[in-house]
Amino acid sequence: MDSNVWDGIIVGASGGSIAGVTVYIIQYCHEKIREVTEMRRVNAWLRENSTGGKWRSTRAVASWTNLTEDRVQYLCSKSEEIQLSTGEKEGMWGHRKSINLADC
């Protein structure tokens, strides 16, 4: 085989690899940016609406933030600023700085 053929194969493989890695990096960055913006939106809403020991359901948070319930549940479980109630009001969410921790 001629060296031009091998050069073409190497260039094609390198270009394909670089394109694949670039697409992966862009998708990863897009997902992280989306997660941060949505988590900020959920945190802000809960900070305002869980004052005085009020716990909020996943459905209420999803309704007010225009996100799906599954997405809200995922974001709330990942956030360090949001706490899940484990007491009588099981399955409810509250912002750590806004709720009375004795009401858990």
Image (cartoon, helix red, strand yellow):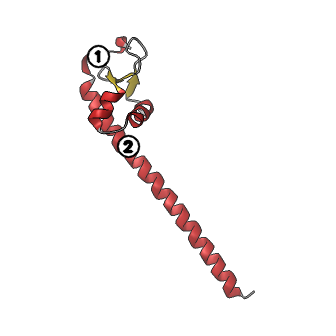
- Residue type of the residue flagged with mark 2: Val
Bin the neighbour count of mark 1 within 10 Å (Cα to Cα): few under 14, some 14-19, many 20 and up: some
Residue 94 appears left or right of 48: right
- Residue type of the residue flagged with mark 1: Gly
Q: Secondary structure at mark 2?
A: helix
Disc 1 target residue: 53
* x then y, percent, for residue 51: 25, 21
Cα separation, mark 1 vs mark 2, equals: 26 Å
Bin the neighbour count of mark 2 within 10 Å (Cα to Cα): few under 14, some 14-19, many 20 and up: some
Task: Indicate which disc, 1 or 2, sits on the residue closer to the N terminus.
Answer: 2
Res. 5 image quadrant: bottom right
* In front of the other: 81 or 45: 45
* x then y, percent, for residue 88: 39, 11
Res. 104 image quadrant: top left
Is the residue 44 above or below the residue 102 in the image? Answer: below
Q: Which mark is residue 1?
A: none
The structure residue drawn at horizontal position 28% and vertical position 18%, both measured from the top left corner, is 54
* In front of the other: 36 or 97: 36
Disc 2 target residue: 36
The structure residue drawn at horizontal position 44% and vertical position 30%, both measured from the top left corner, is 77
The structure residue drawn at horizontal position 34% and vertical position 24%, both measured from the top left corner, is 57
